[in-house]
Image (cartoon, grey):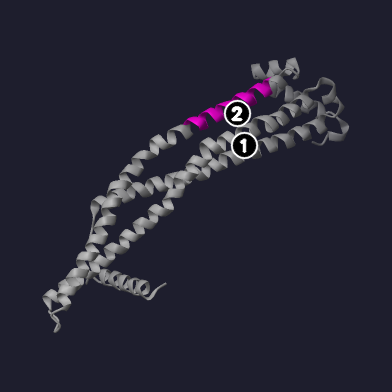
Amino acid sequence: MSWSGFKKTVDRATTQVMMKAGRVERTNDRDFETELRRYRTMESAATKLQKEAKGYLDSLRAMTASQMRIAETIDAFYGDAGARDGVSRSYKKAVEDLDAETIKALDGPYRECVLDPISRFCNYFGDINECIKKRQHKLTDFDGMRAKVKKLTEKPDKDPAKLPAAEREAELARQAYDTLNEQLQDELPRLIDLRVPYLDPSFEALVKIQLRFCAEAYSRMAQVQQYLDADTREQYASGNLDQRVEEVLQEIRGLSIAGTV
């Protein structure tokens, strides 16, 4: 940091301390504070959306990976019985295809149409926040110089040149602050209003990608259903599957090796 930058940092810190002590009047801009609150709300929502959108893709991968582990375990559990009627192998094949074809096919479009646009939007926040921070610095400089002018006006210094010099500095500080303040007052509302037309295509893509995944998953699982026992499907549809399960459990309890269960 240069000496000039260091001195400005010290002067601003001093001004902020004097503000807290009530010795320097703080400029309040309610219009800007309103827009700043709206911006912070949008920034928070967009950042959360970016995180959750990435989490959705990770969750799809985790879910299909879990399905594949379940399918492998079920296939091993059924053994030759599953091989004869094809149900466990069919389920395993359906899950493998869902992971190998559907998830991988959706990965690219999801990144391109959903994740990347949201991330690019969020990337602007760094520059905007830096501009907001710079505006606050310029406002602190202006408030500090204004307080200095007021002090010299109320209690003139022995050097008569100090007041005009302070007034010139105060005017330069005001101009620097006004330039940034007007820019933010104009552009923050426009940025906030642009969030909807910007996000609309990504939202539409998200819905279509979810629809495709659900449709593919339903179609593949429907193919597996034909291998299930017809009586089992009927009992499930009629709500009597619990009774079937209980009957099988009762048979297991009847075995001498499981008699104490």
Q: Which residue is drawn at 37% across and 76% down?
A: 3
Q: Residue at x 56, y 35 (%)?
A: 110
Whole-percent x, y for residue 35 in the image: 30, 48
Residue 181 versus residue 162 in the image, above or below: above
The answer for how far apart the CA atoms under marks 2 and 1 are is: 9 Å
Marks 2 and 1 close (CB-CB < 8 Å)? yes
- Of residue 116 and residue 48, the one placed in the foreground of this image is 116
Q: What residue type is labelled 2?
A: Phe
Residue 124 lies left or right of residue 67; in this view the side is: left
Q: Disc number at residue 213?
A: 2
Q: Quarter of the image for the C terminus: give it.
A: top right
- Of residue 162 and residue 28, the one placed in the foreground of this image is 162
Residue 215 lies left or right of residue 137; in this view the side is: right
Q: Residue at x 60, y 36 (%)?
A: 108
Residue 98 versus residue 123 in the image, above or below: above
Where is residue 77, by image quadrant? top right
Where is residue 79, by image quadrant? top right
Q: What residue type is labelled 1?
A: Leu
